[in-house]
Each structure stands twice: as structure tokens, then as C-alpha cells.
Amino acid sequence: MKGVVAAMLIAALLTCCGVGVAMPPIVPPVQYEQFCEAQKVSGQGVVDVSTSVIDKKIALEYYNVMSGDGDFELDQEHAYSQDADKLKRNVSSVNDGLESNLNLYETTKLTYSGAVPLVGGKYIHSKTFYGGIGADIQEMFAVNEMEKDETSFFVSTTPYNPPNSSPEQLVKDLKAAGRNQTRVAELMGLNPAHLIGIDTKTTFNGTWGTDAKWHKIFYKDIKAHEMFTGKFEAEKLIKFHENPVPEKVKHPCEGIDC
């Protein structure tokens, strides 16, 4: 009896957690929300900058913070939209550099020099619990000198108004398209679906590093870690992408009248 109960619990976990099952894109809410911030700052003194965006409706968790005391220049943009059709940007590592529909786009051009280290980090996460793919990327640094040109991007939703369809029907159409990638591309248009990434070029004197992982319980565990201390130049792209076509879920009692 205990063995049967254990098997049922495991089967329930596998089903509810989507183990081995690609997540369909999230249907954007009808009453969508947006946030935009653009700034240029140049000067000398105390620096304290932070931005966070948490949205359970699109499985997004994002933090970007830094603080220091020195010579500082910053040219930065944050753009967020639950309706990805309203946020179009060209990202060199997405769609061959063509325009893409995104839920979050951030770009930073930064220079810093000071006796007090500039300490900060960035965290971007597609949360499985809210329908994301379970991938996250983290950047950390403590530097006395830095020049950085960086772009971050995230999308998890379907097109808001797919041609001759609806977002809800689109999820079903994607499942029907299966391995027909031409059909999938037609359905998604400029929207790359489940995508999370950071593309950076940086030179620094201090400590800088990244951690990236993609985990699905009992099924997938991908980790990448790098940390450098000293004087370095680095170019790095980290990107996680999942095909938007959901797998067929096989329930434990499929074919049985239960």
C-alpha cells in the first residue's frame, strides 16, 4: 500500500511540476501594464542605483542594483510591457538581430572609477511556479574601475493579437504545429517566446562574474559559473531559450476510467 501511495505522489509531482514538458508561452493579460525608465547621469560622488520588476503574470523576476563613490557615467534604459507586441527592440543575439517583441529590455552603458569599489549585481529569472521555464542569470561585481556595455532581455508571453486567432487559441495551435518549425514561426511572428538572456562587453579592475542555471525538477540541471579578479576584458552572451511548442502530457491514469 505504501508503495502505491508513493508512486501516486511521484506521478502527481511529475504532472504538476511539468517535468520533461516544455512550457507553453504565457497568455498576456487583457489589462496589460508597462514601465519605462531612461536616464543619463554623469558626475562624481556617491552612487546608489536600483531597479526591480516582479510580475507573477508573466513569470518575471528582475533586480538590478549598484552602489559606490567615485567618477560615474551612466546611460541606461529599462522598458517592460506585459504586452510584448508593444515593446520592440533589435537585439543582436535574438532573431538574427532583427526586431523582436519582448516583455523586458534593459540596456546599460557604464563607466566608473573610484577608490571605493562600485558594488552591484543583476538577477533575471523566469519562474517555473508562475509558468516560466525555470532559468535564471545573475551578474555580480565589486570594481574600482569598469567600462560596460550590456543588454538584458526577457520574454515569456504569446503575441497579444495573433492574426486570425486569439492568444488562448494560439497555445493550442502551437501544440498542433508540433515539429513544423515553419508553422511555429508563422504563429509566433517576431515573438521568440520563452527567452532570457544577457549580452555584455566589459573591462574592469576588481571582481566580476556570472552565474546561470536552468533547472527542472528530476529532469534538467544546467549550470554555468565564472568569476574573475584582477584586470580583465570580457565579452559574454548567456541565453536560455525554449521552443514554445508544449509536449503532450501523459497523465498517470491515461486510458483508464479513473
Image (cartoon, helix red, strand yellow):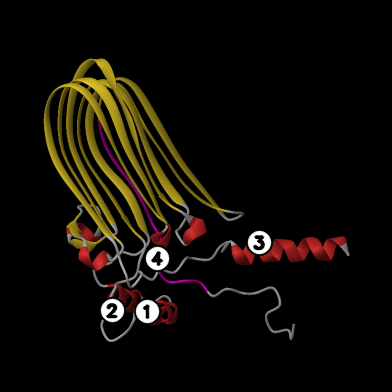
- Residue at which label 4 appears: 243
Looking at the rendering, the stretch of residues picked out in magenta corresponds to 234-247
Residue type at the position of mark 1: Leu
Q: CA distance from mark 4 to mark 3?
A: 23 Å
- CA neighbours of label 4 inside 10 A, class few (<14), some (14 to 19), many (20+): some
Residue at point 79%, 60% (across, down):
6
SS assignment at label 3: helix
- Residue at which label 1 appears: 170
Q: CA distance from mark 3 to mark 2?
A: 33 Å
N-term-proximal mark, 1 vs 4: 1
Q: CA distance from mark 1 to mark 4?
A: 14 Å
The foreground one among 175 and 68 is: 68
Of the numbered discs in the image, which one, if any, rests on residue 13?
3
N-term-proximal mark, 3 vs 1: 3
SS assignment at label 4: loop
Q: Are marks 3 and 1 in contact (CB under 8 Å)?
A: no
Q: Are marks 1 and 2 in contact (CB under 8 Å)?
A: yes
The foreground one among 258 and 48 is: 48
Q: CA distance from mark 3 to mark 1?
A: 27 Å
Residue type at the position of mark 3: Leu
Residue type at the position of mark 4: Asn
Residue at point 62%, 67% (across, down):
15
Q: Are marks 3 and 2 in contact (CB under 8 Å)?
A: no
Q: Are marks 4 and 3 in contact (CB under 8 Å)?
A: no
Q: Is residue 109 above or below residue 60?
A: above
N-term-proximal mark, 4 vs 3: 3
Count of labels shown? 4
